[in-house]
Every structure is written in structure tokens, then in C-alpha cells.
Image (tube, rainbow, N blue to C red):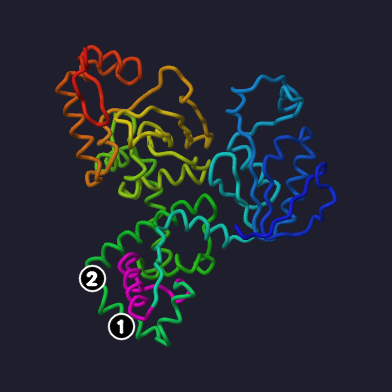
Amino acid sequence: MGLNADGWDPYFAPDEPLTVHDVVLLNYVLNVIEDTAERRETLSKAWQLASGALVVSVRLKWELATLNATGLSDGIVTSRNTFQHFFSPSEIRRFVEEVTGQRCVSPSPGVVYVFRRDEQRFAYLARGAITDFEWTNTQDYASAVAEIVSFTEDRGRPPLFEEIPADLVPMLGRLSRRTLLDIVHQGASPERVAVGLKRTTLDTLLYLGTSIFNGRVGFNDLPLNVQADIKHCFKTYREACTRADRLLAKIRDDTYIRGAMRNSPGKLTASALYVHRRAVPKIPVVLRLYEYCGFVAAGRPEGWNILKLEHRGRRVAWSSYPEFDSDPHPTLDWTYAVDMNSLEGNYQRFGDRANRPLLHRKEEFLSPEDPDVDKYRRLTSAEIKAGLYQNPTIIGLETGWASELERCGVELRGHRLVKRKT
């Protein structure tokens, strides 16, 4: 990756100098330290060496189910005679915050980022909440201006000079800000700008709503792009924060949440809304905020593609169906859920079970304009016509679904239903 890195270990590399670095990684170290005082001291020393950020990763409690071990202190001794303390996602976050005195961010379960400066943390959170504009390579003045116009249509406002890539600026010559705004005004589509402005307004509300978890700061401490969005989308910073707080309060309103779910892409059941990852950007902003609060509280796992938001209680779950696109009825590999009351995370693995849960009516998890919806809808219609959904209580698991396919004398070939060969 082109980064200069140094490693230190008290046993394998004790002679390496311990000096201050921009980023310090403390990877799977805290969980192998038996003495709690030494555990705290190690974390404290690592933080002292980090001028920019500290990254801490640990093993999590749900891994215990796969181990044969004996108990010792607040952990276990493995078959290899090594000590392991397994953390919960909330435990490691609280521990790091207590030792460093800084608010933390969990990008994924078992991983914690702690930043030396607040503005670094806010900038990181902004990247997750506010849609990035993807600049393309440009070779001349005309294409550089076209990129500026595209940014304006996408974000609903012209870019700050600080947001323009360094290699693009020279192609614009010595344009003044006023001239640049005139060019944008002439070239940008008003309709697209309006759509972009609405999206940026909602993204900003999402960012400000979740910032309550990490401390609401003064306007001048926000990332420059967020400041620009607020100035363009709201009359004042106070108005923006007030609207974000009202939106955050709506998450506790069952009636409001159910109403948002009824007007959202996804499959709505008696207890929850299920949405494919591709459709998440299109769900109402209050539901995006609901999901983002779960992410900020306990981390969002890698590799998920189905989101579950409960409207009976408050619980966020991310699940992985690895073969969703290729398998007409994909099976569940794992799910990670966060209880929004306790902020505890729970992981369950299904991939190694003999009788796994599976999905039906895949089109219901997607937005209507998704290119695969028609293909999935045709399959569902054929399955209904064949009588495969007459016993809904048994088809949610592999064995029950297989028995219904056999009963109806049909089989699947890709996303086509055909008569079973005798």
C-alpha cells in the first residue's frame, strides 16, 4: 500500500524502537493479556504512541462456541495453552473510551477506532453518512468544467475549492469563485440540482442525527464539506440540528416508524422490515438513521446484504446470503444483530447447519426499479402457480422447501421452474 510501517512485540521483536506514529494498530493483543492491569497499561501505552489514530481489534464472545477450553480469570485457556479474554462489542468500546478518554467509533464488530482530534472522528463519520462524489480523470478545461457541473448536480451545490481534486484545479486556469458559479449556473440542470439538494439535505440530517452518539460540536469544528452542505441546505446550524434531533426522536415513535416502513422498499412483515443492501439508499431517511445508529453503537459487519429493522422494539440486524444474486432461494450464512436498548451485539452462524433458513420472493427485498426484479417476480409467479407456497410454515428451511418441490413435481434450473424428471 506504500505505507511505512514498523512492528513491535515484547517477545518476537523486543528491540524495535517504540516511537510515535500517525496510526498505531493494536491487533488481537488485549485479548491475550491475562492480567487486567497489564491489559489497561498496554492500551494506554499504545494510545500514547498514536499521534493521529489508534486501531484496536479483539476476539469476540461468540467465538467461544467453537472452542474447547477451560476457564481462567476473566477468560479461558485454549488447547494450545494460551490465554484468551473474549470481549463483547460494547465492552471493548467502553474499555477503550475509558482508558483513552476519547469517544470511539466501531467500523465493524470487534474493531474500534479512536482519533486524537475530534475533527478526524467527525470527518470519518461524514464519509459514512454523506454520499461521496466520484471524480473522474480529466484532461482539459472542458472536461474539468463538466466535472464541476456534475458535482453540483449530484450534491445540489457547487464544490468548495478544497473539494476539487488537486490535479483538476490547474485545468480550470485562474477562474474566480464568481466566474465558476456563473459557469455552473449556466451548465447545471435545475431539476438534477434540486434532486441533489434533497439528497444532500437528508444526508446532512443523517450525519447530524448520529453525531449525538459522538458529541455534537460547534459549526466550525465540522468537516468543511459538511459546513458547506449546512450553509446551502439550511438557514442556520441551529435549524439543522433541531431538525436532526426531531428526526432522531421519531425513531422512538412506533407509529411513525411503521408508516415509514410502509413507504419504503423492502419486505415488511408483522415485526420488521427486510431490505437488500442495494435498496438501502432508497429507504426513508428516518430508517437510514435507525440503521446508522446501530452501526455507530456496535459496528456494521463486512459482507452483509440483507438489513433487518424491527418495528416491534428497536433492533438492527445485518445478514449475509452470499448467493443472493445467483441462487433463486439463497441460504442464510450468518446474522449480526444489535439491540438498541442495551447496545449489545449478537452473532449467529447458520452456514454450517444441515437445515439452513432460505429466502423466497427475492423481488420483495429490492427497490422496484432494480434490474433483477422482473426476473425474480416471474419465478415467484411460477412457484405460486405450481402450489409451492401452500404450506408457508415449512418452506422457510431447506428440508421443508425440498419436500414441497418434490410434492409439486418441480425443480429449479437457475431462476426457472421446470417439471421434475421422472
Q: Residue at x 29, y 30 (%)?
A: 328
Q: Residue at x 69, y 53 (%)?
A: 24
Residue 378 percent location from the top left of the image: 18, 33
The one nearer the camera, 14 or 119, is 14
Q: Amino acid at mark 1?
A: Asp
Quarter-of-image position of residue 10: top right
Q: In the rendered view, tell whether residue 186 sits above or below residue 93.
A: below
The one nearer the camera, 272 or 51, is 51
Q: Which residue is mark 2?
A: 190
Residue 319 percent location from the top left of the image: 42, 34
The answer to whether 398 appears left or right of 88 in the picture is: left
Q: Residue at x 63, y 40 (%)?
A: 92
Question: How many neighbours does mark 1 have within 10 angstroms: few (below 14), some (14-19), or many (20 or more)?
Answer: few
Count of marks, rendered view: 2
Residue 150 within the segment the image draws in magenta = yes
Q: Which residues are magenta?
A: 140-163
Local secondary structure at mark 1:
helix
If you read the primary sequence from the N terminus, does the residue marked by circle 2 or circle 1 appear first?
Answer: 1
Circles 2 and 1, Cβ within 8 Å, touching? The answer is: no
Residue 171 within the segment the image draws in magenta = no
The one nearer the camera, 154 or 221, is 154
Q: Residue at x 52, y 34 (%)?
A: 345
Q: Quadrant of the N terminus?
A: bottom right
Residue 4 percent location from the top left of the image: 68, 60
Q: Amino acid at mark 2?
A: Pro
